[in-house]
Amino acid sequence: MIQPARMPLFLKQEGTESNIILKNISLTYNQSGKDIRALENVNLQLYSNDFVCVLGPSGCGKSSLLNIIAGYLTPSEGTVFIDGSPHTNPDPQVGVVFQQPNLLPWLNIEKNVEFGLKMKGMTKGRRVEIASHYLELVSLKDYAKLYPHQLSGGMKQRAAIARTLAANPKIILLDEPFSALDALTREKMQKHLYFIWQQTQKCLFFITHDVDEALLLGDRIIVMHSNPGRIVREYKNPVARPKEGDFRSIRLQKEFFEMREYLIDQIQEDDEKDE
Ligand code: ADP
Ligand code: MG
Protein backbone atom coordinates (compact mmCIF):
# COMPACT_ATOMS: atom_id res chain seq x y z
CA MET A 1 0.00 0.00 0.00
CA ILE A 2 1.25 3.47 -0.81
CA GLN A 3 1.99 5.34 2.39
CA PRO A 4 0.94 8.99 2.61
CA ALA A 5 4.42 9.93 3.81
CA ARG A 6 5.80 9.06 0.39
CA MET A 7 3.59 11.67 -1.21
CA PRO A 8 5.09 15.09 -0.66
CA LEU A 9 2.72 17.86 0.34
CA PHE A 10 2.61 21.05 -1.71
CA LEU A 11 5.04 19.71 -4.17
CA LYS A 12 7.14 22.21 -6.09
CA GLN A 13 8.09 21.61 -9.67
CA GLU A 14 11.74 22.48 -9.96
CA GLY A 15 12.76 24.64 -12.87
CA THR A 16 9.24 25.57 -13.97
CA GLU A 17 7.84 29.02 -13.70
CA SER A 18 4.72 29.50 -11.61
CA ASN A 19 2.24 31.58 -13.63
CA ILE A 20 -0.73 31.49 -11.34
CA ILE A 21 -0.73 31.85 -7.59
CA LEU A 22 -3.77 31.55 -5.33
CA LYS A 23 -3.06 33.23 -2.05
CA ASN A 24 -5.20 32.75 1.07
CA ILE A 25 -8.45 32.40 -0.90
CA SER A 26 -11.63 32.23 1.17
CA LEU A 27 -15.23 32.51 0.05
CA THR A 28 -18.40 32.93 2.06
CA TYR A 29 -21.80 32.78 0.38
CA ASN A 30 -24.75 34.27 2.12
CA GLN A 31 -27.96 32.40 1.54
CA SER A 32 -31.15 33.62 3.23
CA GLY A 33 -29.12 35.30 5.95
CA LYS A 34 -27.04 32.17 6.59
CA ASP A 35 -23.30 32.13 5.87
CA ILE A 36 -21.86 29.19 3.91
CA ARG A 37 -18.09 28.91 4.12
CA ALA A 38 -17.47 27.51 0.62
CA LEU A 39 -13.68 27.98 0.70
CA GLU A 40 -11.22 28.55 3.51
CA ASN A 41 -7.64 29.67 3.10
CA VAL A 42 -6.83 27.98 -0.20
CA ASN A 43 -3.22 28.34 -1.32
CA LEU A 44 -2.03 26.92 -4.61
CA GLN A 45 0.57 27.49 -7.29
CA LEU A 46 -0.04 26.49 -10.90
CA TYR A 47 2.77 26.10 -13.39
CA SER A 48 3.04 26.22 -17.16
CA ASN A 49 2.46 22.72 -18.57
CA ASP A 50 0.86 21.62 -15.29
CA PHE A 51 -1.97 19.09 -15.32
CA VAL A 52 -3.70 19.49 -11.98
CA CYS A 53 -6.75 17.41 -11.08
CA VAL A 54 -8.87 18.69 -8.23
CA LEU A 55 -10.72 15.88 -6.54
CA GLY A 56 -13.35 16.12 -3.84
CA PRO A 57 -16.93 15.24 -2.94
CA SER A 58 -19.88 17.23 -4.18
CA GLY A 59 -20.22 20.54 -2.36
CA CYS A 60 -16.57 20.88 -1.25
CA GLY A 61 -16.11 24.09 -3.24
CA LYS A 62 -14.46 22.86 -6.45
CA SER A 63 -16.65 24.90 -8.80
CA SER A 64 -16.43 27.94 -6.54
CA LEU A 65 -12.64 27.74 -6.71
CA LEU A 66 -12.74 27.42 -10.50
CA ASN A 67 -15.07 30.40 -10.78
CA ILE A 68 -12.66 32.47 -8.71
CA ILE A 69 -9.68 31.54 -10.92
CA ALA A 70 -11.83 32.31 -13.97
CA GLY A 71 -12.57 35.75 -12.54
CA TYR A 72 -16.35 35.10 -12.47
CA LEU A 73 -16.46 35.24 -8.67
CA THR A 74 -14.61 37.55 -6.30
CA PRO A 75 -13.19 35.81 -3.22
CA SER A 76 -14.24 37.15 0.18
CA GLU A 77 -10.56 37.12 1.13
CA GLY A 78 -7.31 36.51 -0.74
CA THR A 79 -6.03 37.13 -4.23
CA VAL A 80 -5.35 35.28 -7.47
CA PHE A 81 -2.15 36.44 -9.16
CA ILE A 82 -1.39 35.84 -12.82
CA ASP A 83 2.21 36.63 -13.72
CA GLY A 84 2.47 38.65 -10.53
CA SER A 85 -0.60 40.83 -11.11
CA PRO A 86 -3.90 40.47 -9.23
CA HIS A 87 -6.56 38.91 -11.43
CA THR A 88 -10.07 40.08 -10.66
CA ASN A 89 -12.11 39.80 -13.88
CA PRO A 90 -12.58 37.26 -16.68
CA ASP A 91 -9.74 37.65 -19.15
CA PRO A 92 -8.52 35.82 -22.28
CA GLN A 93 -5.52 34.37 -20.45
CA VAL A 94 -7.92 32.05 -18.62
CA GLY A 95 -10.00 29.66 -20.75
CA VAL A 96 -12.93 27.68 -19.34
CA VAL A 97 -14.56 24.40 -20.44
CA PHE A 98 -17.83 23.53 -18.70
CA GLN A 99 -19.80 20.32 -18.34
CA GLN A 100 -22.04 21.48 -21.22
CA PRO A 101 -20.24 22.51 -24.42
CA ASN A 102 -22.45 25.63 -24.98
CA LEU A 103 -21.78 25.87 -28.71
CA LEU A 104 -23.74 28.39 -30.78
CA PRO A 105 -26.36 26.25 -32.58
CA TRP A 106 -26.64 28.52 -35.64
CA LEU A 107 -22.92 28.32 -36.48
CA ASN A 108 -21.05 25.32 -37.84
CA ILE A 109 -18.20 23.82 -35.81
CA GLU A 110 -15.48 25.74 -37.60
CA LYS A 111 -17.31 29.04 -37.12
CA ASN A 112 -17.92 28.21 -33.46
CA VAL A 113 -14.17 27.79 -32.98
CA GLU A 114 -13.51 31.01 -34.90
CA PHE A 115 -16.17 33.03 -33.10
CA GLY A 116 -14.05 34.44 -30.27
CA LEU A 117 -11.22 35.28 -32.68
CA LYS A 118 -13.65 37.16 -34.92
CA MET A 119 -14.85 39.15 -31.90
CA LYS A 120 -11.21 40.10 -31.26
CA GLY A 121 -10.99 41.46 -34.82
CA MET A 122 -8.65 38.81 -36.21
CA THR A 123 -8.48 38.54 -40.02
CA LYS A 124 -10.46 35.80 -41.76
CA GLY A 125 -7.32 34.05 -43.07
CA ARG A 126 -5.68 33.82 -39.66
CA ARG A 127 -8.94 32.71 -38.02
CA VAL A 128 -9.40 29.86 -40.48
CA GLU A 129 -5.79 28.80 -39.98
CA ILE A 130 -6.11 28.70 -36.18
CA ALA A 131 -9.51 26.95 -36.21
CA SER A 132 -8.29 24.31 -38.61
CA HIS A 133 -5.17 23.66 -36.49
CA TYR A 134 -7.20 23.08 -33.33
CA LEU A 135 -9.96 21.10 -35.05
CA GLU A 136 -7.27 18.78 -36.32
CA LEU A 137 -5.80 18.50 -32.82
CA VAL A 138 -9.16 17.40 -31.38
CA SER A 139 -9.78 15.05 -34.37
CA LEU A 140 -12.69 17.06 -35.77
CA LYS A 141 -11.17 18.28 -39.01
CA ASP A 142 -13.57 16.24 -41.14
CA TYR A 143 -16.57 17.58 -39.23
CA ALA A 144 -15.76 21.30 -39.45
CA LYS A 145 -18.75 22.15 -41.66
CA LEU A 146 -21.31 20.31 -39.52
CA TYR A 147 -23.57 22.02 -37.00
CA PRO A 148 -23.60 21.22 -33.26
CA HIS A 149 -26.86 19.22 -33.47
CA GLN A 150 -25.19 16.89 -36.00
CA LEU A 151 -22.42 15.89 -33.57
CA SER A 152 -22.30 13.43 -30.69
CA GLY A 153 -21.83 14.65 -27.10
CA GLY A 154 -18.13 13.79 -27.11
CA MET A 155 -17.55 15.59 -30.41
CA LYS A 156 -19.35 18.69 -29.17
CA GLN A 157 -17.18 18.73 -26.07
CA ARG A 158 -14.07 18.38 -28.25
CA ALA A 159 -15.27 21.35 -30.32
CA ALA A 160 -15.66 23.32 -27.08
CA ILE A 161 -12.07 22.41 -26.14
CA ALA A 162 -10.84 23.50 -29.60
CA ARG A 163 -12.70 26.81 -29.19
CA THR A 164 -11.02 27.40 -25.83
CA LEU A 165 -7.57 26.47 -27.16
CA ALA A 166 -8.02 28.80 -30.17
CA ALA A 167 -8.02 31.80 -27.83
CA ASN A 168 -4.51 30.73 -26.71
CA PRO A 169 -5.06 31.02 -22.93
CA LYS A 170 -2.29 30.49 -20.39
CA ILE A 171 -4.46 28.15 -18.37
CA ILE A 172 -7.59 26.13 -19.14
CA LEU A 173 -10.08 25.42 -16.36
CA LEU A 174 -12.31 22.39 -16.87
CA ASP A 175 -15.28 21.78 -14.56
CA GLU A 176 -16.22 18.08 -14.75
CA PRO A 177 -16.20 18.37 -18.55
CA PHE A 178 -16.94 14.69 -19.25
CA SER A 179 -19.48 13.95 -16.55
CA ALA A 180 -22.47 14.33 -18.90
CA LEU A 181 -21.01 11.72 -21.30
CA ASP A 182 -21.54 7.95 -21.34
CA ALA A 183 -18.74 5.77 -19.93
CA LEU A 184 -17.22 4.74 -23.28
CA THR A 185 -17.19 8.26 -24.71
CA ARG A 186 -15.80 9.52 -21.47
CA GLU A 187 -12.86 7.14 -21.67
CA LYS A 188 -12.13 8.25 -25.24
CA MET A 189 -12.31 11.89 -24.19
CA GLN A 190 -9.84 11.32 -21.35
CA LYS A 191 -7.37 9.92 -23.84
CA HIS A 192 -8.01 12.84 -26.22
CA LEU A 193 -7.47 15.38 -23.49
CA TYR A 194 -4.25 13.77 -22.33
CA PHE A 195 -2.97 13.85 -25.91
CA ILE A 196 -4.06 17.49 -26.32
CA TRP A 197 -2.22 18.39 -23.12
CA GLN A 198 0.96 16.71 -24.36
CA GLN A 199 0.72 18.53 -27.69
CA THR A 200 -0.11 22.01 -26.39
CA GLN A 201 1.88 22.12 -23.13
CA LYS A 202 -0.94 24.18 -21.58
CA CYS A 203 -1.63 24.41 -17.87
CA LEU A 204 -4.84 22.44 -17.22
CA PHE A 205 -6.86 22.77 -14.01
CA PHE A 206 -9.30 19.90 -14.15
CA ILE A 207 -12.11 19.36 -11.66
CA THR A 208 -13.58 15.93 -11.12
CA HIS A 209 -15.23 13.88 -8.41
CA ASP A 210 -14.03 10.69 -10.16
CA VAL A 211 -10.89 9.20 -8.62
CA ASP A 212 -10.08 7.09 -11.71
CA GLU A 213 -10.27 10.14 -13.94
CA ALA A 214 -7.89 12.08 -11.70
CA LEU A 215 -5.40 9.20 -11.75
CA LEU A 216 -5.62 8.77 -15.53
CA LEU A 217 -5.08 12.45 -16.25
CA GLY A 218 -3.44 14.53 -13.54
CA ASP A 219 0.25 14.98 -12.92
CA ARG A 220 -0.71 16.50 -9.62
CA ILE A 221 -3.80 15.53 -7.67
CA ILE A 222 -5.31 17.91 -5.16
CA VAL A 223 -7.83 16.59 -2.65
CA MET A 224 -10.43 18.92 -1.17
CA HIS A 225 -12.69 18.40 1.81
CA SER A 226 -15.87 20.30 2.65
CA ASN A 227 -17.29 22.39 5.51
CA PRO A 228 -15.32 24.51 5.06
CA GLY A 229 -14.10 23.80 1.51
CA ARG A 230 -10.33 23.49 1.64
CA ILE A 231 -7.32 21.72 0.15
CA VAL A 232 -6.26 18.89 2.46
CA ARG A 233 -3.62 17.11 0.38
CA GLU A 234 -1.61 17.39 -2.78
CA TYR A 235 0.07 14.44 -4.47
CA LYS A 236 2.31 13.76 -7.38
CA ASN A 237 0.50 11.11 -9.39
CA PRO A 238 2.55 7.87 -9.08
CA VAL A 239 0.78 6.31 -12.09
CA ALA A 240 2.77 6.17 -15.35
CA ARG A 241 0.84 7.26 -18.45
CA PRO A 242 1.87 6.17 -21.95
CA LYS A 243 2.81 8.88 -24.46
CA GLU A 244 0.44 7.20 -26.90
CA GLY A 245 -1.29 3.89 -27.39
CA ASP A 246 -3.11 1.86 -24.83
CA PHE A 247 -4.56 4.22 -22.27
CA ARG A 248 -6.75 1.52 -20.76
CA SER A 249 -3.78 -0.55 -19.54
CA ILE A 250 -2.97 2.27 -17.09
CA ARG A 251 -5.66 0.77 -14.87
CA LEU A 252 -3.69 -2.46 -14.56
CA GLN A 253 -0.76 -0.81 -12.83
CA LYS A 254 -0.23 -1.62 -9.17
CA GLU A 255 0.25 2.10 -8.50
CA PHE A 256 -3.16 2.81 -10.04
CA PHE A 257 -5.22 0.59 -7.80
CA GLU A 258 -3.21 1.28 -4.68
CA MET A 259 -3.48 5.01 -5.08
CA ARG A 260 -7.13 4.64 -6.07
CA GLU A 261 -7.97 2.91 -2.79
CA TYR A 262 -6.00 5.47 -0.87
CA LEU A 263 -7.77 8.44 -2.49
CA ILE A 264 -11.23 6.86 -2.12
CA ASP A 265 -10.55 6.43 1.61
CA GLN A 266 -9.62 10.09 1.88
CA ILE A 267 -12.77 11.27 0.16
CA GLN A 268 -15.01 8.94 2.15
CA GLU A 269 -13.43 10.20 5.34
CA ASP A 270 -14.81 13.64 4.43
CA ASP A 271 -18.25 12.30 3.44
CA GLU A 272 -18.64 10.23 6.61
CA LYS A 273 -17.97 13.14 8.92
CA ASP A 274 -21.24 14.76 7.70
CA GLU A 275 -23.39 11.69 8.45
P1 ADP B 1 -18.62 21.55 -5.79
O1 ADP B 1 -18.35 22.13 -7.13
O2 ADP B 1 -17.42 20.93 -5.14
O3 ADP B 1 -19.78 20.60 -5.79
P2 ADP B 1 -19.55 24.24 -5.11
O4 ADP B 1 -18.42 25.16 -5.28
O5 ADP B 1 -20.58 24.20 -6.19
O6 ADP B 1 -19.02 22.76 -4.81
O7 ADP B 1 -20.30 24.59 -3.74
C1 ADP B 1 -19.63 24.71 -2.50
C2 ADP B 1 -20.63 25.06 -1.41
O8 ADP B 1 -21.15 26.36 -1.65
C3 ADP B 1 -21.85 24.14 -1.35
O9 ADP B 1 -22.23 24.01 0.00
C4 ADP B 1 -22.90 24.89 -2.14
O10 ADP B 1 -24.20 24.54 -1.70
C5 ADP B 1 -22.55 26.32 -1.82
N1 ADP B 1 -22.88 27.25 -2.93
C6 ADP B 1 -22.42 27.17 -4.21
N2 ADP B 1 -22.87 28.18 -4.96
C7 ADP B 1 -23.65 28.93 -4.13
C8 ADP B 1 -24.41 30.15 -4.30
N3 ADP B 1 -24.45 30.79 -5.48
N4 ADP B 1 -25.07 30.62 -3.22
C9 ADP B 1 -25.02 30.01 -2.04
N5 ADP B 1 -24.33 28.87 -1.80
C10 ADP B 1 -23.65 28.34 -2.82
MG1 MG C 1 -19.19 21.63 -9.05
Image: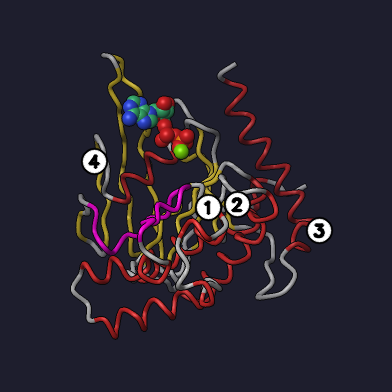
Does mark 1's beta carbon lie closer than 8 Å to ligand 1? no
Task: Report the amino acid beneath label 3.
Answer: Leu
Distance from Cα at disc 4 to Cα at disc 2:
27 Å
Task: Report the amino acid beneath label 2.
Answer: Ala
Res. 252 mark: 3
Residue 211 can be seen in this image: yes
Say above or below: 90 vs 78. Answer: below
Q: Which residue is mark 2?
A: 214
Judging from the image, what secondary structure is the residue with disc 3 in? helix
Q: The magenta stretch spans which residues?
A: 90-106
In this view, the residue in front, 128 or 172, is 128
Residue at the image position 44 percent from the left and 40 percent from the top: 62
Q: Earlier in the sequence, mark 4 or mark 2?
A: 4
Distance from Cα at disc 4 to Cα at disc 3:
42 Å
Does mark 4's beta carbon lie closer than 8 Å to ligand 1? no
Does mark 3's beta carbon lie closer than 8 Å to ligand 1? no
Q: Determine contact: label 2, label 1, CB under 8 Å.
A: yes
Q: Which residue is mark 1?
A: 53
Task: Report the amino acid beneath label 1.
Answer: Cys
Q: Determine contact: label 2, label 3, CB under 8 Å.
A: no
Crowding at label 4, few (<14), some or many (≥20) Cα neighbours within 10 Å?
A: many
Res. 74 mark: 4
Residue at the image position 46 percent from the left and 48 percent from the top: 100
Q: Position of residue 228 (x, y in %)?
A: 42, 28
Left or right of 137 in this view: 27? left
Q: Determine contact: label 4, label 2, CB under 8 Å.
A: no
Residue 230 can be seen in this image: no
